[in-house]
Image: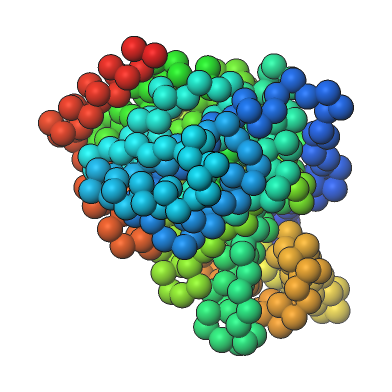
């Protein structure tokens, strides 16, 4: 009967352990060494050099009004709210609620159908400032956000700057359902801050320049080639039109065109956002996972600029897309170490297993340490985060087999014309023609 020597099990264990945890150790060191780019004494760019583009489906609501107010406190030259034609009047009424002195800094535009990429592209030709900031309609900014976002642009090599993010926390009973869903969302953003800061320090790579709040040089986005590619991205060998993943596309564009990017990880550049505090959070996780699959596979195997431009990010972020889910990886490590220790003294074998379990626990806890320091009571929910990490492996697998779905998932009415990737329609062509005319006449 075929058998495998304990030494072979040990070799497999060491290989898998190093693959999974070398990047973790490097990320810990990189995160601890990361520093934001400080504010210059005499900045060449000010808030008057910034236009904020704010895509919104509904064009109204308390959250949107709160977002606009927090952005205007940073005094950008202009804020352009872009909605769909059916909600244009509602968006104009929202703008009308703002103080009269701000009216000349606000205006509304629209597109025919819900499509965030086209909403963004509709506003870009209207911009007359050096910097464009995209923001979601459910974020809030600190008063110094723009100053910190502009600091890296003092270096002409930087083409994009993204903020760090925190969940806008609500108070719920600790073991209530809403508290648990909110806790999982907060940890997602915490891990994202950790990973982005680490890769930014290592090679300047940012896994995704999140559209929640991100700044770019206007000249990059005004390129007619960018506009066409951005609004006509195809996926799966060019078969399907991809309307989702706008922030992933621009992130890859920065890499492929030689622009440096930076994440400003600083309290004054920390936007707050909301995530679902109910089972719809799972739909958000599926959507994010699909985006990661599509974008990371494109980066690694289609465009391939990531390998030479940001090799550490390719290893630490993009390759993890192909890694086995956590529940498989954790189980494989424990099983391989147990099999490798069959010939060891019983005490030594158990010590090895216990040491591995402690190490796994530390690795799952440390990325979120900042959150637990801020909210010590959430340590009671630590087992929830570990079990959800294993469950997320199933979400990742489900996302892999449903990559043609591009619907928002957690927002009613969003992406009504793009639940699945589809072939271009005549209405798409009409919208493209209108965008092209705008681009060429500026």
Q: Is residue 240 left or right of residue 100?
A: left
> Is residue 364 visible in the rendered structure shown here?
yes
Residue 388 pos. (x, y %):
56, 71
Quadrant containing the C terminus in the rendered view? top left
Residue drawn at point x = 57 percent, y = 31 percent: 77
Residue drawn at point x = 32 percent, y = 52 percent: 90
Q: How is the image coloured?
A: rainbow
Residue 115 pos. (x, y %):
31, 42
Asked if 199 appears above or below 155 in the picture, the reply is below
Residue drawn at point x = 23 percent, y = 48 percent: 86
Asked if 313 appears above or below 67 in the picture, the reply is above
Residue nearest the viewer, comparing 97 with 349: 97
Q: Is residue 432 left or right of residue 165?
A: left
| Residue furthest to the top | 441
Q: How many marks?
A: 0
Residue drawn at point x = 83 percent, y = 34 percent: 38
Residue 347 pos. (x, y %):
86, 79
Q: Residue 2 sits in which quadrant?
A: bottom right
Residue 68 pos. (x, y %):
53, 49
Residue nearest the viewer, comparing 427 with 63: 63
Asked if 411 appears above or below 144 in the picture, the reply is below
């Amino acid at each position: 009967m075929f058998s495998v020597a304990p030494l072979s099990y040990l070799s497999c264990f060491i290989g898998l352990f190093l693959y999974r945890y070398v990047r973790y150790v490097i990320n810990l060191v990189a995160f601890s060494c990361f520093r934001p780019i400080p504010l210059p004494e005499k900045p060449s760019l000010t808030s008057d050099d910034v236009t904020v583009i704010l895509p919104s489906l509904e064009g109204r609501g308390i959250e949107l009004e709160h977002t606009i107010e927090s952005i205007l406190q940073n005094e950008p030259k202009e804020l352009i709210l872009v909605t769909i034609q059916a909600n244009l009047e509602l968006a104009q009424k929202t703008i009308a609620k703002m103080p009269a002195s701000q009216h000349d800094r606000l205006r509304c535009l629209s597109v025919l159908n819900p499509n965030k990429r086209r909403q963004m592209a509709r506003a870009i030709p209207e911009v007359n400032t050096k910097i464009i900031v995209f923001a979601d309609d459910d974020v809030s900014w600190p008063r110094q956000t723009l100053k910190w976002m502009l600091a890296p642009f003092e270096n002409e090599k930087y083409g994009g700057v993204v903020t760090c993010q925190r969940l806008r926390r609500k108070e719920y009973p600790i073991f209530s359902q809403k508290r648990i869903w909110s806790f999982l969302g907060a940890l997602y953003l915490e891990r994202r801050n950790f990973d982005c800061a680490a890769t930014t320090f290592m090679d300047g790579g940012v896994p995704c320049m999140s559209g929640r709040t991100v700044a770019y040089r206007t000249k990059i986005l005004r390129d007619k080639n960018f506009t066409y590619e951005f609004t006509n991205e195809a996926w799966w060998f060019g078969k399907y039109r991809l309307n989702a993943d706008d922030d992933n596309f621009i992130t890859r564009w920065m890499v492929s065109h030689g622009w440096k990017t930076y994440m400003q990880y600083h309290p004054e550049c920390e936007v707050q956002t909301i995530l679902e505090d109910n089972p719809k959070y799972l739909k958000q996780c599926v959507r994010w996972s699909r985006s990661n699959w599509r974008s990371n596979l494109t980066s690694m195997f289609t465009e391939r600029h990531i390998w030479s431009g940001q090799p550490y990010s390719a290893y630490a972020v993009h390759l993890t897309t192909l890694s086995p889910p956590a529940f498989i990886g954790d189980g494989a490590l424990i099983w391989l170490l147990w099999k490798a220790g069959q010939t060891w003294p019983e005490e030594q074998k158990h010590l090895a297993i216990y040491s591995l379990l402690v190490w796994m626990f530390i690795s799952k806890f440390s990325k979120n340490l900042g959150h637990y320091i801020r909210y010590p009571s959430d340590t009671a929910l630590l087992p929830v985060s570990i079990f959800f990490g294993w469950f997320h492996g199933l979400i990742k697998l489900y996302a892999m087999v449903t990559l043609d779905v591009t619907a928002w998932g957690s927002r009613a009415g969003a992406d009504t014309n793009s639940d699945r990737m589809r072939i271009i329609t005549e209405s798409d062509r009409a919208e493209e023609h209108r965008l092209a005319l705008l681009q060429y006449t500026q």
